Image (cartoon, rainbow, N blue to C red):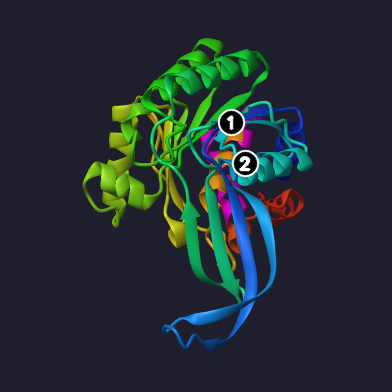
Amino acid sequence: MMRIPRARLKDLFDRFASRTVLVVGDVMLDRYIWGRVSRISPEAPVPVVEIERESFMLGGAANVTHNVSALGAAVIPVGIVGPDPEGQALVRLFEDSGFPSDGLITDPGRPTTLKTRILAHHQHVVRTDREARFPISGETEARIASFVESKMSGLDAVILEDYNKGLLSSGLIGRIVRIASAAGKPVFVDPKSEHFFEYRGVTLFKPNRKEASEQLGFELKSEESLRKALAVLIERLDCAGALITLGEDGMVLQQSGGDFRKVPTRAKAVHDVSGAGDTVIAAMAVAMAAGAGFEEAAVIANHAAGDVCGEVGVVPVNRIRLLRNLLDESA
């Protein structure tokens, strides 16, 4: 994989601050319950977690928003919340983080997506989810599309972050891609299974290995299968580039009409892979909005994913540490 010259890295990172990225997707409230285990329940063979503290963080597409901001770019989040205390808490988290909240629409017919992780001694014990997965209404779709269009002229990139919670319907995907295309803005997609092949004409399509394998109908284990997968994705989606994340095996990348590229993992110690995909799509979008090519952006995104995998829980990338690590390995 390529090494980016030090001067080029510094120039790209300096440009991050002048870029604005809009993130449309399934925002979530991540709740962490921290405790310790010293006994097994007499009621069932399960551990008893004695709660010591709890915390709330931005999850799902909200974590992508957090990563875009952590890289230094301005960000506009777009999503839906429910008319509940969790929705109010999520909006407060956005505002406390300095993000605008006018793109967060309250949908009275669904709850705010809440993921509760119970951890003991820094290890996951169990996770509970409260969510709705049905598609948004036509009225909500129109409101979101109108908001996105009103912001488009001031953007440098758009991220579509799909978690199969119903926000990114077929209609909304098509409307946003058409609006962005007409304005000449790049679109970066982190898909899920529901509308996998409906993101036609985007700039970058980034599934993980499991998602791509399930949708393409063959296993992605060999280099030959990965080459085939990228070629099929580019052809079927008519996208400018495709990137498949492979967990501990890194990533593979191909541009339309370009060469296959392997990107080996940069994680020094993997404590938690939660949110690594969010970090990758955020870094790809911010780096390319700042002028990086596909391969340069992939190098930056790969190091960024390695950075967050060294932390417990869903956390945003550390921009200073990321740049330092990249400079240490630069040409």
Q: Main secondary structure of the magenta part?
A: helix
Residue 304 is one of the magenta-drawn residues: yes
Q: Does residue 310 sit above or below 229 in this rendering?
A: below
Secondary structure of residue under mark 2: helix
> How would you rate the neighbour count of disc 1 (Cα within 10 Å): few for under 14, some for 14-19, many for 20 or more?
some
Is the C-beta separation of discs 2 and 1 under 8 Å?
A: yes
Q: Does residue 305 sit above or below 62 in this rendering?
A: below
What residue do we see at 72% from left, 30% from top? Answer: 100
Along the horizontal axis of the image, is 41 left or right of 49? left
Q: Which mark is residue 106?
A: 1
Residue 9 seen by the camera: no
Residue 72 seen by the camera: yes
Residue on which disc 2 sits: 87
Residue 95 is one of the magenta-drawn residues: no
Magenta span of residues: 286-305
The Cα–Cα distance between marks 2 and 1, rounded to whole angstroms, is 8 Å
Q: Position of residue 94 (x, y in %)?
A: 71, 40
Quadrant in which residue 215 is drawn:
top left
Q: Does residue 30 sit above or below 51 in this rendering?
A: above
Amino acid carrying label 1: it is: Thr
Q: Position of residue 324 (x, y in %)?
A: 74, 54
